[in-house]
Amino acid sequence: MMNEEKLKDLEKLGIVPLANELKSYSIEELQEMLELVEKGKYKKTLKSGVVGRLNSLRNQKSVLNVEPIEAVAPTSTPIVLEKTLDADIIKDNPHQVRVDLKEESVISMMDSIRKDGLHTPVKVFLNEEDKEYYLVSGQIRLTAYRRLKNEDNEKYSLIPISLSEKEVYTELDFTREALIENAIRNEMTTIDFAISLKKVYDMELEKDKDLTLAIFAKEIGISRAKVGRLINIGEMLEKDIEYMELLKSLDIQGERIILAVGKLQGYTLKEKSRILEDNKNGLLSVAKIEALKNKEVEEEVIKVASKSKSASYSKKVSSLGSLFKKYKYEDFSEVGRKKIDEQIKKIEAIEDEMKTLIKDEIEEL
């Protein structure tokens, strides 16, 4: 039995946790919940979440050829379901939050559609100015459907859509809705998510100067600490495009490692690449990387630490010369001189190898 206390608890949840929580409710419970929400004073996010979940269930029943439930009351962003469009006429989201579409994700979605069909429609918006349909969310699903259409035009000519009847879609609307859906599905790379999250936060901050990270994190449904890290990453990568491209090429996803290496001062991109690869291969922990502050300082520490080793090596080499100061070469027997000559040749060969090694190491620095 749904009651006001339960609704108050749900109202406290962020968008993502709320969406996950509502998955455990039946259609009847959701309808009862909606009636109570409309009678009381609750946040718009609660009503939107309930309506969205009801519409999702309604669409699933339609796909399974079961009599659909009665349409739910419209919200500030009403959705009309049970529509289809030619996948090729849908324009990509003009403010797409996902820059990199992983090929394996698209292939996996294609396999899923072939096997079970598309149960979750892509969300689109009809722009009254140019009469064009624009994707709001569902880039992987749309990409998969377009490819399947090339394989079988008749079977995959039309893609299921949920059409937003909102009259105007701002950049913030496009970005925010796509970001939230991708957060729920956990399909975005860390880089894309960080850049998009910072973009949404900046736009929200322009509308509300009193917006705090804690409030924003609660609305998105992510911990404040995680939001803080992601926004820091977004700021960092906006200023350092080369570093961002390096992360993409190495497929680095960890938030801590991205921040740790990005904060290193005095390191070249090549050196950062080596550090990232060492971490990826388990040779260097994030904690040790976080302990590095400035390359000049680190080099000074290394220099001091290696002085004793250098002195030790020099002492060992110079001690060979002191032997010939103490004993004259001609004092040795012919057999002895022959053995000494053989050892000297070995020493000369080692010396040549050492020179080459040192030269290579210097060039690497």
Image: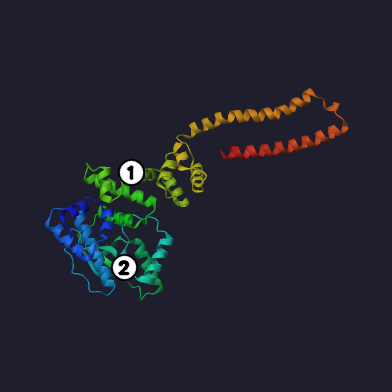
Q: Is residue 351 above or below residue 184?
A: above
The answer for how far apart the CA atoms under marks 2 and 1 are is: 34 Å
Q: Earlier in the sequence, mark 2 or mark 1?
A: 2
Q: Residue sitting at 15 percent across and 54 percent down?
A: 4
Query: In what quadrant of the picture does the C terminus appear?
Result: top right
For label 2, the residue is 119
Q: Quadrant of residue 110?
A: bottom left
| Residue 27 picture location, percent across and down | 22, 65
Front residue of 179/112: it is 112
Secondary structure of the residue carrying tag 2 is: loop
Q: Please identify the residue farthest to the bottom as the structure is shown.
A: 154
Is any atom of residue 129 visible in this view? Answer: no
| Residue 51 picture location, percent across and down | 21, 61
For label 1, the residue is 225
Front residue of 105/21: it is 21
Query: In screen coordinates, is 51 left or right of 39?
Result: right
Classify 10 Å Cα crowding around label 1: few (below 14), some (14-19), many (20 and above): few
Secondary structure of the residue carrying tag 1 is: helix
Q: Is residue 190 above or below residue 346?
A: below
Classify 10 Å Cα crowding around label 2: few (below 14), some (14-19), many (20 and above): some
Which amino acid does the dot numbered 1 rest on?
Ala
